[in-house]
Amino acid sequence: MSLVADLFTVATVSAGVFFYFAGTVGLLRFPDTLTRLHALTKADNLGLGLVVLGLLPQLAGFWAGMKLVVIWGLVQIASAGTSQLLAGLAKRQESGE
Amino acid sequence: MSEPFALLLTVLVLLTAGWIVTVRERRAAVLGFIAYGLLLALVWIRLAAVDVALTEAAIGGGATGVLLLRVAARLGDLRPMSAQPGRMLKWLAGLVCAGVSLALMALVLALPDPAPSLAGAAMEPLARTGLGNPVTAVLLAYRALDTFLEIIVLLLALIGVWSLGPDRFWGGRPAAWYEGTPSSALTFLARVLPPFGIVIAGYLFWIGADEPGGKFQASTLLAAMWLLTMMAGLVAAPRTGSPALRGALAFGPLVFLVVGLAGIGWGEGFLAYPDRFAKPLILLIEAALAVSIVAALALMVAGPAERNTP
Amino acid sequence: MTHSLVSAATLLGLCACGMVGIGLYGLIVRPDALRKLLSFNILGSGVFLLFGVIGRRGAAAGLEGDPVPQAIVITGIVVAFSATALAATLLVKISDAENALPDAGREEDEA
């Protein structure tokens, strides 16, 4: 049983790390602010989701898991909000210049 | 977590520090500093100092970051403080600084083994305080005087910040964050996040007695939520002269002082708690301090009074 | 120190020494006041970290580190923030005063 859980954790966390990696490659390689933001938010949110999902079977209790899920949700909200703000700033700077 | 993780952190921290010092643009340097604060939080976790990690992430990364980003945007073309050094002077400074680093490194490698420690002395009377987190016990029981003086430092710094505003606005409100209407994304964040922030701050405060957490981390979080609603224009920054605000600022140190003086009355000495009431008294002081710390942190970031709107 | 060349705590201690050096360098070499403030903070965080490493080495009595340096570093971080806030507000004040001068002609500020 614990072997299955461990395999699940390794697989999902590895997938999460892959998406983080892809997001970072996008951040470094994409040409302008909007596409970079797109790469970062999409890939990193998925990456964090997979890491959290993978860690859930390793936790001691229900509430510890809930804390991780809440962290994931808060990061979603924060990254959605801040990337909107950054995109707005980029747009204003473009039209200003 | 093992040696490679520590090595990776070391490389990242030093690279980020070097980048902050050398990068051309001010704003880039400040953004680098926020990343640096978060990396340091990871370093503190690696050192098993989770209380410090939380404080560093909240204050070193968060509060300092917001403060300096705003300042960097407002500075405009500030006159340089010293002349641009020539190549020769740069090399010389580099050599001196490398010398300082190497001397410190020699000291680190020569630290005594086994290391001296107060851990035993901190754990032994822990049961008498009713606390489970030795760091909180050091902050509020064994070295309570330090914490008392620290809140005084916070207030003095806030008075310093306020006194830098124009005289005619003394007692008025700090400047607004934006000229026009703030973006809808910011308003969304300022509406959604505070309820979570308040719950999490309450949790951090309560758990701080026994686990990593405590009043500083909780207060910084609350101050951040307050600042967020101020930035989004949902609430106005408070008048710096309002009696409620000044009362909140004085509340923490006053409660601390009263409990401290009562310690003399109980025959235990200044800031000593009778065993049976140690935990309730510590929680009372922490709660009162939290009120003052939230107000002081938020208003230090908000800056001096710059308008007189009622 | 038994298995590897240096333990993680010692390695991070060396990192702290590097941070002190880098902060000091920025403080001396960069003419911009905000950069001096950032450099000073880097220097300070290096000192805090050195303290933390010494605390970590003092792990005893079932704790993973000596709680006394940890508590003092927490106090230090908060005090450093207050000093930074005061200094940053002072910079804004200086900048406003300079920009208000009628002959605001000056050399380039950033380099």
Image (cartoon, rainbow, N blue to C red):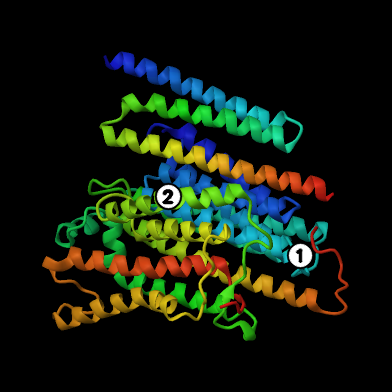
Binning the other alpha carbons within 10 Å of mark 1 as few (below 14), some (14 to 19) or many (20 upward) gives: some
Give the quarter of the image for residue C62: top left
Marks 1 and 2 close (CB-CB < 8 Å) = no
Front residue of this view, candidates B235 and C100:
B235
* Quadrant in which the N terminus of chain B appears: top left
Residue at figure coordinates x 23%, y 49% from the top left: C61
Res C60 seen here: yes
The chain under label 1 reads B
Q: Is mark 1 on a helix, strand or loop?
A: loop
Residue at which label 2 appears: B53
Mark 1 and mark 2: Cα distance apart in space: 33 Å
Seen from the viewer's position, the closer of residues C46 and A63 is: A63
Amino acid at circle 2: Ala
> C30 or B301: nearer the eye?
B301
State which tag comes first along the sequence, 1 or 2. Answer: 2
Residue B171 picture location, percent across and down? 54, 82
- Residue at image location 25% in from the left, 68% down from the top: B284
Of helix, strand and loop, which one carries label 2?
Answer: helix
Q: Where is residue A39 in the image (x, y as percent from the top left)?
A: 64, 30
Numbered disc in front, either 1 or 2 = 1
The extreme left residue here reads: B276
Relative to residue C111, is residue B214 drawn left or right? left
Labels in figure, total: 2
Relative image position of residue C41 (x, y in whole percent): 57, 60
Q: Name the residue under label 1.
A: B76
Residue B125 falls left or right of residue A95: left
